[in-house]
Image (cartoon, rainbow, N blue to C red):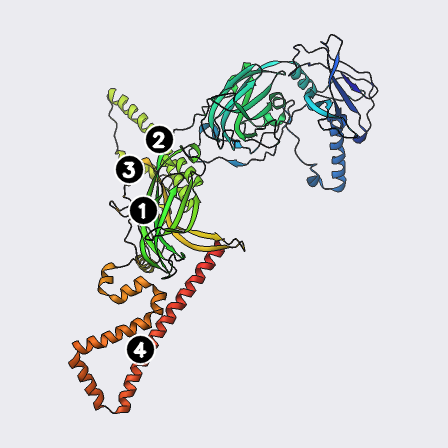
Amino acid sequence: SCRIEDSAPQCTSPSQRPRPAFCNFSETLIFKDVILPEDENEAPYVDIKAFDKGSVMGKSLLATGSFWLGNSAYYRELRNKRNLTLARSSRSRSQNGAGAEPEKDIWSNEEYDVDEQVHRELDWVNQAPYMKGRTVLMNEMPAKPVFSVVKLYRGKKMAVKSETQKYELEEVGKFHLFVRVIVEGSTELDFRTKRIMDAMRDKQKFRVRLYALEATDLTAKDGKTSDPFLRVKLANSQQDTDKHMKTLTPEFYQRFDLTCKIPGDSMLHLEVWDWDKFGSNDLIGTAVIDLESRWFSNHWHDNEVKPIEHVSLMHPSSSQSQGLLQMWLDMAPLKSENSIPKWDITPPPPADFEVRLVVWKAEGIPAGDHFSDQSDLFVKVRLGASAWKSTDVHYFAKKGKGSWNYRIKFPLCLRQGGRVVGGGEGASYLKVQMWDQDLLSSDCLAETSMDLSDAFKTAFNTRDLGMEYSVFGKSSKQLKQAAARKKMQGEESEWVVKKKKDDDASAEASIGGEISETTSLLSNQKEESQKGISAKGKKRRSKKKPKSIMEQMRGALGLTAPENSGWIYFGKTDLKTGKVESQGKLLVSVEILPSELVDRRKNGDGRDEPNSFPLLPPPEGRVDFTKMMMNPFYALQTCLGDSLAKECGAGCFCVLLIVGFVAGGVIFGPEVQVMMSILEILPKEIAKLVILGTLILLIFVCCYCCCCVCRKDKIRENDDEDEFESLL
């Protein structure tokens, strides 16, 4: 029943198929001699009441609602005319939108332009066919139907009664209402209104294709995980996907072919459940999509290729989202269902990879042994939940510097999107720790982690291009290389087809008695590969710029970082000040290779043979144990450390000096007597000056060397701190 102010109420006939969940009327109610004010703020309301006529005691009120005519098309046109007049008078049509193009309307012949906010375009490398030209929305696509949606309410007793109110409104349904105002003097409806009303009365069967891709951020129902599956319900049909065990990010990748009637029962229910072996399944979240509102929407028909949506899953007991479902919809009348394609969304099979990590060197690491101010450093790494792997030990590492040149490899299996097969939370993280080895137990000096999820995704997308992906390489250069290889593969495939046609043609000609000239396969391939390359490009390929002499010398001395390497920084947060303090840095290289490239570029762990890709030289700055056996001063400095050796140097020097004098007197007695005789011949003043000058020179040289070393260390420490702070 509908009523406008004091007019007589008008009622529809009972619904053809009475159902509490969905009832359809498709009737037109006409109110004549209704006076509408020009001011939209004074526009009346349409009161709507829903009754149940099947009651034995007569009809009973089920719900009520209202629609404000100020939201009707009549008042929208009045607002547009007023805005146009104001825009022309103020000469600011562009600011007020008066000069904008009219909206495209599927119910007329006008054009409609929608500014759709797109989150991102999917990756261009190895796109699935169904992703070409398809955009991704981070939320649900708005319907924007041509009719109005009115919420129906019913009063109920409040759970917690107040002094002034005992009842509250409860939403019990929605009512689709199409309102048009016919101005006095007009006898016919316009073409657009007639077309909409005819479409609403003409009930048709529709083919609905739902493409369910994956769900993310699901709420755990079994401790920290769930066993989710998707249930799709439309009209009287229900379909379920297979269950996915112990995951919060299930990948469904399944197409559902459904049917419904529009207008009719067209509410699509998407439910994600947690499967339980014993007892009933638990609802994780549900979403409802109104297909009727989408079909009667200009916005829906404007998108020829429907975007991928992220639909929020809600639970009746919570107002927070319980996860997101990634999907898209296609639908068309059943008689023209061939107009919408059937996409194969089966994901590509998982692929095997190998992560190769090279640990080069470290700087600025805090000392593990405060007595000698040095450490026995080694590095431990782990990818995801794999076992920890370690480098060899750099014994007696001084000034926080360590050198390893050590290769560590991890096997890896990736699926679509660069996700790790069988990996849970944190499977894409590379954890790095710096340790100090002790006799009884080792100490962890610093740690950090790297997120390789983006690198895994790029490596999976470029797996068929025969190239490795370097984490610290130039991304733009690697993507350009991947694009070039992708283009080259396409050209080679076209060339193969063309070559096959030419061979078939030559075979037919030879059968007919004609012999055609043949050319070399390699020459044709070279010509095809050189197409599109300019003369400058060929020159750059033929002449590669050599490295300068200084660059070669710096590389030979180890003063430059290896190619495709980068520093990762260790930091520690001070709990009192909240400031992040530097704990040193580590130079590493990380490469991700597909399985076919792993077989062609074999190498060993650490520095074992085959030592290639890249060649790892022996580490620098290591202790020479042979020299320790031969040189007691070197052994003393190595064991005690530089700082402790400086402090104990005077005492040790005196002891060694006494021992040296005694040994020298025994071994070099005659030579010492000759030197003493020469000094006795000289005048006493000159002899004293010679001895004093020699001692002063030795002391000055020692002091100068010590000051230079200390100042150099101080400058290097300040540079490391400045570099870390700039990174933060």
Secondary structure beneath dot 4 equals helix
Give the mark nearer the N terminus: 2 vs 1.
1
Amino acid carrying mark 2 in the image: Ser
> Which residue corresponds to mark 2?
493
- In this view, the residue in front, 451 or 562, is 451
Question: Vertically, is 568 above or below 7?
Answer: below
- In this view, the residue in front, 590 or 601, is 590
Amino acid carrying mark 4 in the image: Leu
> Which residue corresponds to mark 1?
407
Residue 143 screen position, x and y as percent:
62, 27
Please indicate whether residue 18 sits to the left or right of residue 369 in the image: right
Q: Nearer the viewer, mark 2 or mark 1?
A: 1
Please indicate whether residue 339 sits to the left or right of residue 627 in the image: right
> Which residue corresponds to mark 3?
599
Q: Quadrant of residue 189?
A: top right
> Which residue corresponds to mark 4?
698
Q: Nearer the viewer, mark 3 or mark 2?
A: 3
Which quadrant: the N terminus?
top right
How far is the residue under mark 1 from the one under mark 4? 46 Å
Can you name the residue that lies furthest to the left here?
670
Disc 3: CA contacts within 10 A as few (<14), some (14-19) or many (>=20): few
Amino acid carrying mark 1 in the image: Arg
How far is the residue under mark 4 from the one under mark 2? 77 Å
Give the mark nearer the N terminus: 4 vs 2.
2
Q: Are marks 4 and 3 in contact (CB under 8 Å)?
A: no
Secondary structure beneath dot 1 equals strand
How far is the residue under mark 4 from the one under mark 3? 61 Å
Amino acid carrying mark 3 in the image: Asp
